[in-house]
Image (cartoon, helix red, strand yellow):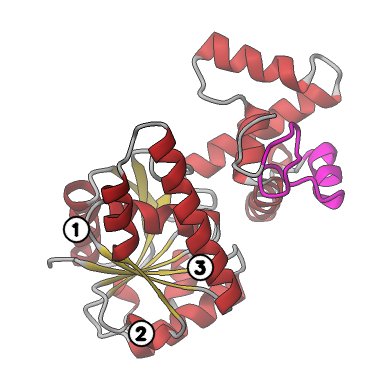
Amino acid sequence: MNIRKVGVIGAGTMGQGIAEMLAFKGLDVYVTEQSADRLSQAMSAIELSLDKQIEKWALTQAEKKLVLNRIHPIQKLSDLSGCELVIETITEDLDSKKIVFDQLDRLCGPNVILASNTSTLSLTELAGVTAYPERVIGMHFVYPVMKTDLVEIVRGLKTSDDTFNKTKEFVEDVIQKKGVMVFESPGFVTTRLICLFINEALHVLEEGVASAEDIDSAMRIGYSFQHGPFEMADRFGLDSVLAALDRMFREYGELKYRPSIVLKKMVRAGHLGIKTGIGFFNYDKDGDRI
C-alpha cells in the first residue's frame, strides 16, 4: 500500500506537529478542526514553527513554502475519504473519539487505515464502534514530533497483522521513525513511564527536598535528559499529564498513579505550561523559557 495522502483530525499541539512532520516528509496532509477559527490558528502556528526553524538555519524559505503547500486545511470529515491513512489526534475523551471513528468508518473505504494518537485510551473500545475493527490501530507520536524519532504502534484486540505491517512500514520507511510495537495497555510504554517520573518529581517537590529548578538541573545534567521533569510537564501540558495520570489511576488502581496535589492545584489555577505561558516556569509566545 502506497500511502501518499494522510488525514489529520485535530490541530492542537500534537496535530500541528504531526501535520508539519508528514508534510516535511513529502506527503499531502489534510487537516481538519472543530471550527474554521481553530484551523486558521493551527495553520498560523505551523507557519510560526517553520519560521523559527528558518531563524536557526534548519530550513530555507523554499522548503517552508513546499511544506505549507502540502498541508491542506479542510472543513468536513468527508474530505478525508481520499486518504489512505487517517490519524485522529483530538482531546483525550473516549466518547468524542468514538464519534469520530464512527463517522470515519462510514466515510472511508474498508482499506483505509484509521489510527489514533491516543496515549491512554483503549484502541479496542474505539474500534468497537466501527464495522471494520481490524483496520483500527494506535500511532502514538511523542512530543516534539519533528525531533522525536519514535512512534508507538499500538495493537487493539482486533487489529489485523496486515494493518500492523502496513503501519510499521509507513512509520519506518516513509516517515523514517522507529516503530515500537505495543499491546494495548493504559499509558502504553512512554506515557506510563514518563508520567510516573513526573509524578515522583512532584512528590519530591512537595516534600521540600529540592526546588523545581534544581530537580530539573539534577536530571538534565546528571542523566543527560533534554528537559527535566517539570519542563517536560510544562511542554506536554499540565492538564494532559493530569488526565493521563487520572486515567491510569482508575485503570490500574495503584497509588503510584495518583496525581500529586501540586499538579491538581496548578491545573485548577490555569497554569498549564507553554500553552498558557506559565507552568512551573515562564514561557514566551514562541514557547521558549523566559
The span from disc 1 to disc 3 (Cα, nearest Å) is: 25 Å
Observer-side mark, 2 or 1, equals 2
Q: In this picture, which residue range is highlighted in magenta?
A: 260-284
Q: Is residue 281 magenta?
A: yes
Residue 112 is situated, as x and y percent measured from the top left of the image, at: 26, 76
Image quarter where the C terminus lies is top right
Q: Residue at x 44, y 56 (%)?
A: 184
Q: Residue at x 24, y 61 (%)?
A: 27
Residue 206 is situated, as x and y percent measured from the top left of the image, at: 85, 26
Q: Please, which residue is most extreme toward the front here?
A: 61
Does the rendering let one see residue 129?
no
Q: Secondary structure at mark 1?
A: helix
Q: Nearer the viewer, residue 48 or 135?
A: 48
Q: Which mark is residue 10?
A: 3
Residue bearing the label numbered 1 = 165
Examine the image and state in which quarter residue 87 appears.
Answer: bottom left
